[in-house]
Image (tube, rainbow, N blue to C red):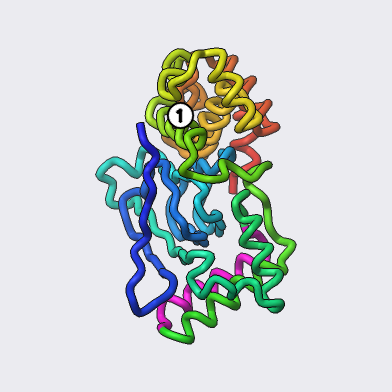
Amino acid sequence: MKVLPFKVPVSEETSFRVQVDRVNHFYDKFHHHQEVQITWIQKSYGSLLMGNAITTFEENDLLVIGANVPHSFQNDEFFYKKNKELLAKATSILFEKNAFGETFFNLPEMKNIKNFIKKADKGYRILGETKKEIIAQLKMIEEKNGTERFLILMEILNRLSISKEVELLSNLSFLGNPTSSESKKLEAVFQYMLDHHQRTIKLEEVAKVANLSISAFCRFFKLRTRKTFSQFVNEFRISAACNKLLLDDFSISEVCYDVGFTNLSNFNRQFKKITGYTPSQYIVKHEV
């Protein structure tokens, strides 16, 4: 099970890419690319696995993912069915750190932006007025070309770099060199978890994916993620459950079994532990 090194296509006429996705569901394979990614989720919802972070994404989220950080946007299962009413739509900017020259971000004027890009390997969710301003600029950038498009990108990066309205998605810089053998092992384990999280996953299985003994795998996973594998899987399942609970199509017990739990009391316990709410409280909290 390999994690895909993803090559973002850029034309010879531009140094970065503006990408608009209008698809049935987002690209859901665990992958990484050299580009920093700024993504505005216009439509869609689901779970985001990024580095060691597991969170939900929803309509109007604005996210920043650092270069070479493995990630996967997992839409809810409804997006994989032939439902014409559901559409996953996002606008993204993708650029390499050296796309504007190896020394560009070393300029004194670029200090704040350089620091922001460096910290992006932990991932950001952008909030408040900053989000509103940048979404407005993303709407404009689609219509621009050449120097105008480049200047809007610089305005976006500058606004991000000075904003306090940011939420870190991960609690540590993750994985380092994506070509290292340890990173490849961990990425393969994550992809296996994504593919099989709706059933019980035994430690023997994931240890085999990582080509390690069970005891060696447990030490390795805890060292690299600061979580046990069972904690990690539970967090992903609860993330998926959060989206489903806000739909009218599922009861709490149906959500429990649909995301991979085999026991309702354990589901309720894990949900409260991870979110701070019971499933019922979570539903009430998010009612409009």
* Foreground residue among 160 and 41: 160
Name the residue tied to disc 1.
Answer: 189
Q: Residue 46 magenta-drawn?
A: no
- Amino acid found under the numbered disc labelled 1: Val
The answer to whether 30 appears left or right of 24 in the picture is: right
**179 to the left or right of 171:** left
The secondary element bearing badge 1 is classed as helix
Query: On the picture, is 196 further left or further right than 101?
Result: left
> Is residue 206 positioned above or below 139 on the image?
above
Q: Residue at x 51, y 75 (%)?
A: 100
**Can you say whether 288 is above or below 108 in the image?**
above
Q: Nearer the viewer, residue 213 or 35?
A: 213
SS majority, magenta: helix
Q: Nearer the viewer, residue 213 or 127?
A: 213
Q: Which residues are magenta?
A: 126-145
Question: What is the quadrant of the N terminus in the image?
Answer: top left
Estimate the x, y position of residue 164 in percent, counting from the top left: 74, 62
Of residues 201 and 86, the one nearer the viewer is: 201
- Residue 162 lies, in percent from the top left, at 72, 69
Q: Position of residue 285 (x, y in %)?
A: 65, 41
| Residue 261 visible in the displayed image | yes
- Residue furthest to the right in view is 164
Does 132 appear in magenta? yes
